[in-house]
Amino acid sequence: MAANWKMFKTPAETKTFFASFLPLVKDTTGCEVAICAPFVDLPEAVSAAAGSAVMIGGQNLYWAKEGAFTGEISGPMLKALGCTWVIVGHSERRQYFGETDETVLRRTKAAMEAGLKVIVCVGELLSEREAGETEAVLRKQFEGGIAGLTAAEFAGIVIAYEPVWAIGTGKTATPEMAAEAHRVIRGLAAERFGGAEVRILYGGSVKPDNVKALMAQEEIDGALVGGASLDAASFAQIVNFAS
Ligand code: PEP
């Protein structure tokens, strides 16, 4: 279960979150938990999560290790802070910051090289779904952004299927719709990487009251949670969905 805090929370708010959240998940088993926080919150998040099973991640990185790239953050920098994960290719980065399948691939490779695990996001727009293009879009994003990985690199990623129309809108894909898209992605992975297994998260308005139905689908291995991850009790309920 991964949290994407987007551009929310100060370091002080991060500290408060962890003080409430950690006791609620201290007995959780069978579920990896990662919190992907804004860059400025990462030191606080890493220090608050120390000694717990909760892992910390960034929400983006640049592919160079260092250099004259004002405003950017590299994989080695995230790693040095104590991050385990990083999100790459979130639809908000594709929509507002010019992320393309090609830059998704470059960032993913750079993250792996830095020793980070990567959550690579894919998903279609509403217009694409309505035009019956979901599968074609997933294929294009997979072929442009993931298929260029080596088998060893592929083993270090988790894919997040996030239909763009479901992100932050309160509209969730039905569990069947999500499972169908996950099957498509799994098929693409099998085509390119043979029998390699990959975990696929669903993202898009996951809340405590719909997580169980989504997770009941065999194809869905976890969730990438935006809005509902900002509240400690609500994200803890999602993490503890099985109990
Ligand atoms: C996200 O930010 O990846 C996301 C899925 O957001 P939300 O849960 O708010 O739809």
Image (cartoon, rainbow, N blue to C red):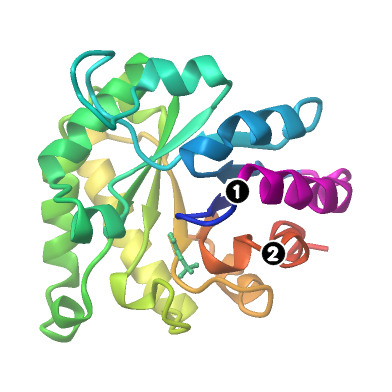
Local crowd size for mark 1, using a 10 Å CA cut-off: few (<14), some (14–19), many (≥20):
some
Residue 234 lies in quadrant: bottom right
Taking the spot 68% from the left edge, 46% from the top edge, the residue there is 14
Disc 2 secondary structure class:
loop
Whether residue 11 appears in magenta in the rendering, the answer is yes
Residue range (magenta): 10-29
The answer to whether 158 appears left or right of 62 in the picture is right
Depth order, front residue of 100/215: 100
Magenta segment, prevailing SS (helix, strand or loop):
helix
Residue 11 lies in quadrant: top right
- Can residue 187 be seen from the camera position used here? yes
Q: Amino acid at mark 2?
A: Asp
Depth order, front residue of 219/57: 57
Taking the spot 46% from the left edge, 55% from the top edge, the residue there is 6
Position of 29 relative to 5 (above/below): above
Depth order, front residue of 187/78: 78
Q: Amino acid at mark 1?
A: Thr
Position of 161 relative to 69 (above/below): below
Q: Which residue is mark 2?
A: 231
